[in-house]
Image: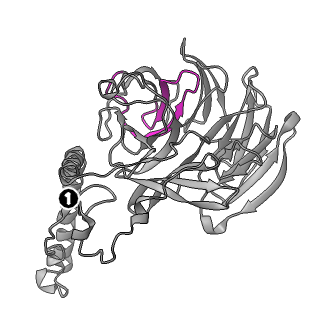
Amino acid sequence: MIPSLCWIARGVAAEEPLVLKLDTDEINHLIEQTKQNLEIVENTNEEESDEEKEDDSTTNKKAGLDDDDDEFNMAEYDNEEEMDGQRIFGAGLSGVTYYANPSDDPYITLPQLAEEEEGYEIKQTDNLICCAKLDGDMSNIEVHLWNADEQDFYVHHDILIDKFPLCVEWLSFDAGDQDEIEGDRTPGNYIALGCMSPQIEIWDIDIIDTSEPVAVLGERLKHSKKKPKIGKKGHSNAVMSLSWNKHTQNIIASGSADCSILLWDLETGSAKECLNHHSDKVQTLCWHLAESTTLLSGGYDNTCQVTDCRTKNSKSWTVDGEVEHLIWDVSNPFSFLAGTASGNVVCIDIRQDKPLYTIAAHDNEVSGLSMTKLIPGLLATCSADKTVKVWQISDNKPSCVTSRAFPEAGSLHCLSFVQIMPPCLQ
């Protein structure tokens, strides 16, 4: 499953990304650090597991079962022979043994080719797509490379993560610790990641085989009933949406399941403002394309909000279902489009109180919306009904141009136009 993706503009990525190589001490340090970060979560899981065992024991006794009926010796199932490598613990990596030197791994029998350390060059004509991916118990950030001229499309590199990913947002602002930055901050190639945890991680995707983010926003490691706070604490529940302000580049907005929106200062790593206009989870955010202080948001409370972040004043519209996704109309600075859980796309002019029109777009929730500046009025939508549709919405007269089903892909959660000619959809 791919819950979120974004395009990375041509020429932004480093032509020769840095290939990170860790020694044994550094790997052990990262493993110990991960153990400490997950200690609270693991203790919680152990308590829940103990309760389940007690329930199972009670059930077995009532059913007349005892340990003598353990025909396959399942009680000793986990008592495996210890290996020499370092065990890794955490969501998606539990039980994996890592070797600093691949030659020490008994399961690797083929020699490592020198070419594996090369071939990371990125050309000026290459397009990069970054996506959050969940495959079974494994979560990662994948960076795909696509070159239309050479018909190349493959995973350039990926980053393993230990949390369930919900959203990704590209940014060029260096959010690293100022004490560790030599001189002024320079634009880079970063991805902000929102997960089921209350924290926001920022990763440098110009580094191959990186094992830790350059910055983490928020200090809470697990969900809490406490209210979100400005400052270092941050959200108290999952981060469901992110939007980077391209005009005020040290600001990124985050929407959470704690019903709040936080405005983060990337220079200090702290939240400067907290917006509480929504009464339920904040599912989607989008800064205005031209106005640096205007933020569009949508949530499970069936409302779309446009907020002036200078005064915190907002205007609200109620739609026919939970708001799954929002975008500004690239052809009209006063309009935005909302995809709802009822399968509709609603177009709203912020100067009016009622929607301009509503499109019955899909049979299930509209989970993705995208427009391109290259063709005015061209809108693409995707849905959990496994279809992608392209619309022409010029002059407020929407019509469907084409539709395609992807039954093998399952539910579709996101899509995006690349801003080059000819426009392509991912």
**Horizontal side, residue 385 vs residue 33: left or right:** right
Highlighted range, magenta: 231-260
**What residue is disc 1 on?**
51
Q: Position of residue 65 (x, y in %)?
A: 17, 81
Which residue lies most toward the front here?
Answer: 114
| Nearest the eye: 73 or 87 | 87
Q: Secondary structure at mark 1?
A: helix
Which residue lies most toward the bottom here?
Answer: 71
In the displayed structure, 240 sits above or below 19; it is: above
Rendered image coloring scheme: one colour
- Please name the amino acid that badge 1 sits on: Glu
* Label 1, residues with CA under 10 Å away: few <14, some 14-19, many ≥20: few
Q: Main secondary structure of the magenta part?
A: loop
In the displayed structure, 319 sits above or below 387; it is: above
Q: Is residue 245 magenta?
A: yes
Q: Could you tell me how many numbered marks the image carries? A: 1
| Nearest the eye: 170 or 388 | 170
Q: Please give the name of the residue rendered at 41% of the width and 56% of the height, measured from the top-left corner.
A: 139
Q: Position of residue 223 (x, y in %)?
A: 33, 40
Q: Is residue 421 magenta?
A: no
Q: Please give the name of the residue rendered at 35% of the width and 25% of the height, measured from the top-left corner.
A: 182
